[in-house]
Image (cartoon, rainbow, N blue to C red):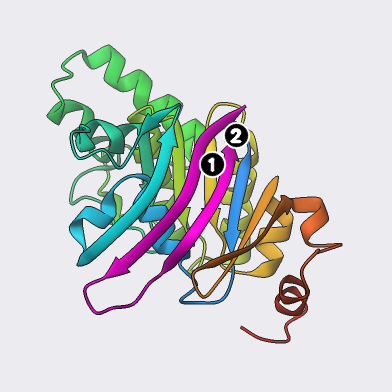
Amino acid sequence: MNKISIRNLSLTYSDGTQPLKNISFDIPANQISVIFGPAGGGKSSLLRTLNRLNDLTDLKYQEGSVLLDGREVLDPALDVIQLRRQVGMVFARPVVLPFSIQKNLTYGLEVAGETNKDYLLDVVESSLKKAALWDEVKDRLADPAIALSGGQQQRLCLARVLALEPEVVLLDEPTSGLDPISTGKVEESLQDLKSEYTIILVPHSIQQAARTADQAIFLLQGELIEVNRGDLIFTNPQDTRTQDYIQGRFG
């Protein structure tokens, strides 16, 4: 079953650049879909379109359709705040709030009006467990989040998104600044999480793409080149441009 359907999506920024050019593909539910390709290919622009973060950029022109469970994401009348709870995003650089570890996880829910302390504590524990961070921080939840290591901060940011109970999790190079051990923990978490969430990942390397992808999408200069199962696209790509990129001939 498809969670998201993208049809004829094109974007143009005010400076005339066109990061996406008439792309169409589907994102299956409860899988890890990896969007890969050279820098400037439109990967981040695509992620930001899926939860309307492009509304905050100098976007000049947008056409096409993005359906989430059959509902048009690009509809101007859509409740964007609700959409961003449903489609959460983790960025390349972890940005923790200037609060305790626990408060980082409860703050969004409290702002939304949640006051049940038992529920909030349950959310803290469950989201930290899902992000593979609970065992490392369970005895220091009152400590400042900024005291965590970079890898722990990134997993805290993932837990913060999960605390809002999204259906889709977007990740834009979430391990680009992490050491191999922290990277491995994040990747393991994603494999566990896909049973509950639809995950869309922009990886920081071809190797990560190949390790994690159930489905892989190759973008090149704003164009959709190839979509296939991860185990196929990295071993038997159908387009020579995909093969050249995977083999390091450009990019």
Residue with the most extreme bottom position? 249
What segment carries the magenta color? 1-27
Q: Describe residue 39's horizontal placement relative to residue 230 as left or right.
A: left
Q: Amino acid at mark 2?
A: Lys
According to the picture, the residue beneath numbered tag 2 turns out to be 194
- Asked whether residue 74 is drawn in magenta, I would say no
> Residue sitting at 57 percent across and 34 percent down?
193
> Residue sitting at 22 percent across and 16 percent down?
117
Element type at marker 2? loop
- How crowded is the residue under tag 2: few (<14 C-alpha within 10 Å), some, or many (20+)? some
Up-down: is 55 above or below 2? below
Up-down: is 247 above or below 19? below
Quadrant in which the C terminus is drawn: bottom right
- Asked whether residue 10 is drawn in magenta, I would say yes
Q: Considering depth in this image, is 221 or 180 the residue closer to the camera?
A: 221
Up-down: is 240 above or below 27? below
> Residue sitting at 53 percent across and 47 percent down?
200
Q: Earlier in the sequence, mark 1 or mark 2?
A: 2
What number of labels is visible? Answer: 2
Q: Main secondary structure of the magenta part?
A: strand
User: Where, by quadrant of the figure, is residue 48 drawn?
Assistant: bottom left
According to the picture, the residue beneath numbered tag 1 turns out to be 199
Q: Amino acid at mark 1?
A: Ile
- Contact between marks 1 and 2 (CB within 8 A): the answer is yes
Element type at marker 1? strand
Quadrant in which the N terminus is drawn: top right
Please provide percent x and percent y for residue 118: 28, 13
Please provide percent x and percent y for residue 127: 43, 31
Q: Considering depth in this image, is 76 or 158 the residue closer to the camera?
A: 76
User: Where, by quadrant of the figure, is residue 29 drawn?
Assistant: top right
